[in-house]
Image: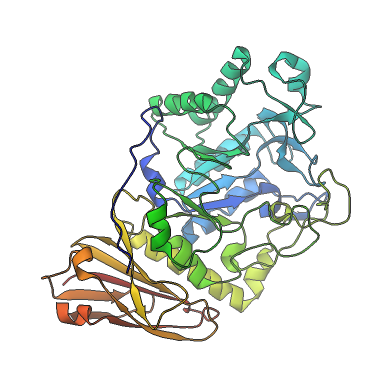
């Protein structure tokens, strides 16, 4: 049995600390052009707008989402893969007219905030399209060449730096944006230090999440599905980490297919993401096990060459699948239940590694997914087990009562948060181990066991 010994880093004093609400984040990434379809696929790039996105916010709030990653809002083109994307940046200081007006953008943010949802927007930090008016207006802001067939910014240019800091600070102070996902690289972390300081001074602390590397968190802190969550806890010393479940980059140079990673697994979502110490990062549609539907304009080649493409970012969320398929509705219901449990027990099931602890649990028989306990010693313990198999799983887990602060205590109340039911047990019963039966991962209500143990 591996027991965790807390060894936590001191935050860099030069960095503005992450907002307190970071601990309860459940991030949902959406491309507004394909997230909703008021006019079908439109011109092939999707017909979603700021207004139609806002109409879905009650659904997201009910699901348990606490932040959206708005992967598209400013002027852009179909430079990459033939599909409109925020990464083909033209102007950052203007919203894309296909999505609506600046007032529509502001109204989307206000509506999100009314539903308790933060808004993170994409920042393309390396540069803009060669055809961007910014290049013509300020040629001295740019390096001679650039990446991705674009022009890259010169971060050493003082006028550009001042404009860049003012621009993104204004999105916080004037429009209410709650943070930034920074594409590819931050390039110069000091500009983000200043943006974060200005936001904090304005009473609106923000979250900064680079794609590669990290600031408060990193988009790619964790991908895949670990079979031993507590062991990963021991290896990672960051206060906050994300778990990117499905990456929107998947399928970007491939043909049509389904590039979601969750595949309807209750065990993967609950055990590896929602109940772990990580911030779940969901891509639109995977919460109901959607089959990927590609927008017609997306192509296989980087600059729009080749046949139909499979870039997950360029998908059209197929809401009819949720409405018409009972199995998808059942999975959506279970995702909602998992996030409700996370919210109800947010004192322990949060992303702040500085306020609680975690330990792997011995299981008999040995299982593929090692059960774990998240706990506040002597106060509350939550036992989590997962079953990825299509058959039921029975096992017994043994609790390290001394580590959990439960030795010499009791009686204990044990609440089955996943299947329902409450029992009262003494210390001897806990020391003998807890018997668990997990339903098939493919069945409604299957894939998981979640027990909440407190003093009776």
Q: Residue furthest right?
A: 306
Q: Is residue 179 left or right of residue 340?
A: right
What is the x, y in percent for residue 300?
82, 53
Lateral position of residue 146 relative to residue 207, left or right = right
Task: In this rendered view, identify the residue nearer to me: 102 or 410.
Answer: 410
In this rendering, position of residue 82 left or right of residue 423: right
Front position in the image: 427 or 347: 427
Q: Position of residue 77 (x, y in %)?
A: 78, 38
Q: On the rendered structure, is 112 left or right of 394?
A: right
Q: Residue at x 66, y 74 (%)?
A: 324
Q: Residue at x 30, y 80 (%)?
A: 421
For the residue pair 402 and 132, the one nearer the viewer reads as 402
In the figure, residue 390 lies in which quadrant? bottom right
Q: Position of residue 403 (x, y in %)?
A: 22, 64
**Quarter holding residue 138:** top right
Residue shown at the point (24%, 64%) measured from the top left:
380
Q: Is residue 86 visible?
A: yes
């Amino acid at each position: 049995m591996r027991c965790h010994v807390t060894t936590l880093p001191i935050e860099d004093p030069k960095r503005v600390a992450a907002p307190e609400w970071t601990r309860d984040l459940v991030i949902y990434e959406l491309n507004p052009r394909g997230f909703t379809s008021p006019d079908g696929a439109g011109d092939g790039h999707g017909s979603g707008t700021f207004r139609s996105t806002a109409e879905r916010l009650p659904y997201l709030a009910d699901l348990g989402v606490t932040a959206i990653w708005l992967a598209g809002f400013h002027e852009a083109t179909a430079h990459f893969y033939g599909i409109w994307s925020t990464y083909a940046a033209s102007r950052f200081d203007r919203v894309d007219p296909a999505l609506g007006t600046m007032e529509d953008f502001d109204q989307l943010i206000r509506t999100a905030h009314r539903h308790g949802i933060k808004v993170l927007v994409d920042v393309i930090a390396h540069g803009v399209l060669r055809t961007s008016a910014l290049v013509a207006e300020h040629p001295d802001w740019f390096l001679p060449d650039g990446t991705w067939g674009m022009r890259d910014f010169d971060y050493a240019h003082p006028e550009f730096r001042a404009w860049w800091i003012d621009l993104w600070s204004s999105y916080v102070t004037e429009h209410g944006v709650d943070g930034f996902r920074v594409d590819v690289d931050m390039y110069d972390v000091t500009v983000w230090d200043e943006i974060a300081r200005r936001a904090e001074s304005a009473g609106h602390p923000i979250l900064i999440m680079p794609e590669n590397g990290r600031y408060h968190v990193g988009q790619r802190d964790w991908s895949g599905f670990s079979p031993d969550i507590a062991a990963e806890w021991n290896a990672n010393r960051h206060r906050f980490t994300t778990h990117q479940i499905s990456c929107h980059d998947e399928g970007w140079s491939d043909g049509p297919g389904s590039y979601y990673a969750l595949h309807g697994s209750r065990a993967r979502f609950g055990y590896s993401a929602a109940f772990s110490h990580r911030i779940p990062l969901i891509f639109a549609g995977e919460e109901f096990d959607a089959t990927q539907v590609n927008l017609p304009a997306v192509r296989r080649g980087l600059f729009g060459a080749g046949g139909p493409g499979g870039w997950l970012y360029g998908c059209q969320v197929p809401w009819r699948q949720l409405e018409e398929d009972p199995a998808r509705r059942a999975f959506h219901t279970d995702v909602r239940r998992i996030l409700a449990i996370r919210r109800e027990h947010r004192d322990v099931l949060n992303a702040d590694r500085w306020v609680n602890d975690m330990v792997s649990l011995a299981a008999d028989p040995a299982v593929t997914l090692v059960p774990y306990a998240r706990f506040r010693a002597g106060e509350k313990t939550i036992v989590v087990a997962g079953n990825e198999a299509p058959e039921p799983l029975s096992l017994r887990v043994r609790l390290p009562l001394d580590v959990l602060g439960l030795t010499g205590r009791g009686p204990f109340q044990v609440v089955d948060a996943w299947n329902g039911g409450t029992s009262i047990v003494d210390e001897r019963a806990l020391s003998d181990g807890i018997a668990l039966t997990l339903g098939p991962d493919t069945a409604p209500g299957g894939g998981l066991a979640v027990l909440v143990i407190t003093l009776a």
